[in-house]
Amino acid sequence: MTGSIEQGTSQTHGNTHILHFLVRLPRPMEKVWPAVATEVGLAAWFTPADVLEPRLGGDVTLRDVGSGRVTAWDVERIAEYTVEGGGRIRFHLERDGDTGTALRFTHEFHGGEASEQRWRTRFERLAGLLEERP
């Protein structure tokens, strides 16, 4: 079973852009969580996390995004990173059936262009990575 990436939606409010995705992954939340909440996991499909203190208020540095803080942290459910210049990135995991995970993703950023295709490519890489792992 492969993952599915539903159409991303994009909103603009002044200079703030908000991108949402729903990604259905054929792995339980316990297997998906490390991919969005650990240095090794993020580096495998998104960007290296040079610093990631896994707790609310912890420091985070995402190499291609910026440095900031962990602004939401609920183990195995929610990881949110707010970085200077890069906005806010939120991963919200929910159970999807008996063995799957629904990843609700939000990227809020200022200026620039919506990065829907770039995120779609990243999520395809994430789904492929999770399929390879037992």
Image (cartoon, helix red, strand yellow):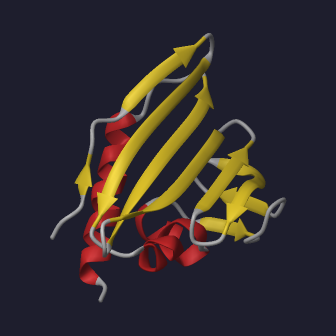
Count of labels in the image: 0
Q: Locate residue 106 relative to residue 5 in the image: left or right.
A: right
Compared with 56, 14 (above or below) is above
Percent of width and height locating residue 112: 53, 23
* Left or right of 97 on screen, residue 39: right
Residue at image location 61% in from the left, 59% down from the top:
78
Quarter of the figure that contains the C terminus: bottom left
Q: Position of residue 72 (x, y in %)?
A: 72, 55
Above or below, comparing residue 28 to residue 123 in the picture: below
Q: Where residue 84 sits in the image (x, y, percent)?
A: 75, 40
Q: Position of residue 26 (x, y in %)?
A: 27, 70
Rendered image quadrant of residue 20: top left
Quadrant of the snapshot with the N terminus: bottom left
Residue positioned 45% across, 72% down in the render? 29
Furthest-top residue in view?
A: 14
Q: Camera-side residue: 6 or 15?
A: 6
